[in-house]
Image (cartoon, grey):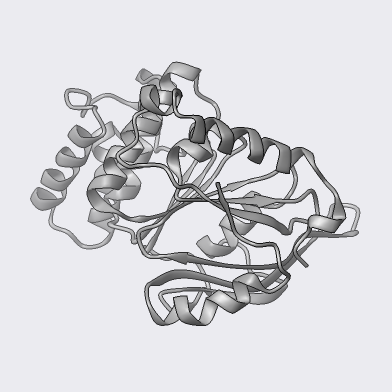
Amino acid sequence: MKVAPSRPNIEDELAPARRQTNAMIAIDNVSHVFRTSGRQDHLALSNISLIIEDGAFVAILGPSGCGKSTLLYVVGGFVSPTEGLARVKGQAITGPGPDRGPVFQEFALFPWKSVLGNVMYGPRQQGVKSAEAEAQSRALIEMVGLKGFEHFYPKELSGGMKQRVALARTLAYHPAVLLMDEPFGALDAHTRTRLQNDLLNIWERDRKTVLFVTHSVDEAVFLSDRVVVMTRSPGRIKEVVEIDLPRPRRRSELLLDPRYQKYVVEIERMIDDTSEEQLRP
């Protein structure tokens, strides 16, 4: 198992070289404070620094309330950090953009549009002609395994099918980065496994940069190149674990691989261990 050393400035030391090569996302000393309904300040993120390379699949893990989703929203441009700066391709993030495609646990589909209408929405908003947008959308619908369901409406779909539509709709924007916030968390185990496999197949084909928030250690290890383990609130980076497992990944093979099992056990221990001595300031 390769675990990035937990020296206080390890990401700061690596950052300049990575930025000069193929960094897609650069998060520099980001902190974020929320104002609660009781007008109290709550520190959600504290001094986060992280570099994510172009084409990498990175998972963020940590206890509930540790700021995983907040960090994702900062990269998405939905939340502005109180301190620090986040960049995509070297440009400061000042708001949402088509280069970053969100996929959330809540499917957020347009209920009045069919599967095809939902997927076509992005290209049409970007000015793509109707015939071309339809052709692109039909190809994406087929890619996520929903050929034949183009004219179904969200209320007629299962949860797994809705999430496939949501993924296709996001991919239709051609984002450089996929921001996924527990996208499979509400699904049953069988559907979740199928969608994990589908996501990896899509990622293997296109190699988009993926930032993936999850509560599942097993899911993070199965999908990712790197797993960022966060502490309890306020969220800090505790460890960055490099997942050295072969690709393409097959669950049936990994379940028999002692390296896979070791990653899962060790990361579980990291999440359970809240010792302040192991925190990265």
Q: Residue at x 40, y 75 (%)?
A: 89
Q: Residue 55, how many percent across, how many down?
A: 35, 59
Q: Quadrant of residue 140?
A: top left
Viewer-side residue, 95 vs 232: 232
Viewer-side residue, 37 vs 10: 10
Q: Residue at x 26, y 62 (%)?
A: 126
Q: Is residue 42 in view?
A: yes
Q: Residue 214, how many percent across, how many down?
A: 57, 40
How many numbered badges does the structure rendering display?
0
Q: Is residue 131 left or right of residue 47?
A: left
Q: Residue 107, how many percent across, how many down?
A: 46, 36
Query: Image height check: is 278 above or below 267?
Result: below
Q: Is residue 106 in view?
A: no
Viewer-side residue, 246 vs 30: 246
Q: Quadrant of residue 182?
A: top right
Quadrant in the picture for the C terminus: bottom right
Viewer-side residue, 237 vs 94: 237
Q: Residue 56, how many percent across, how many down?
A: 40, 57
Q: Is residue 93 left or right of residue 67?
A: left
Q: Residue at x 51, y 39 (%)?
A: 221
Q: Residue at x 22, y 47 (%)?
A: 205
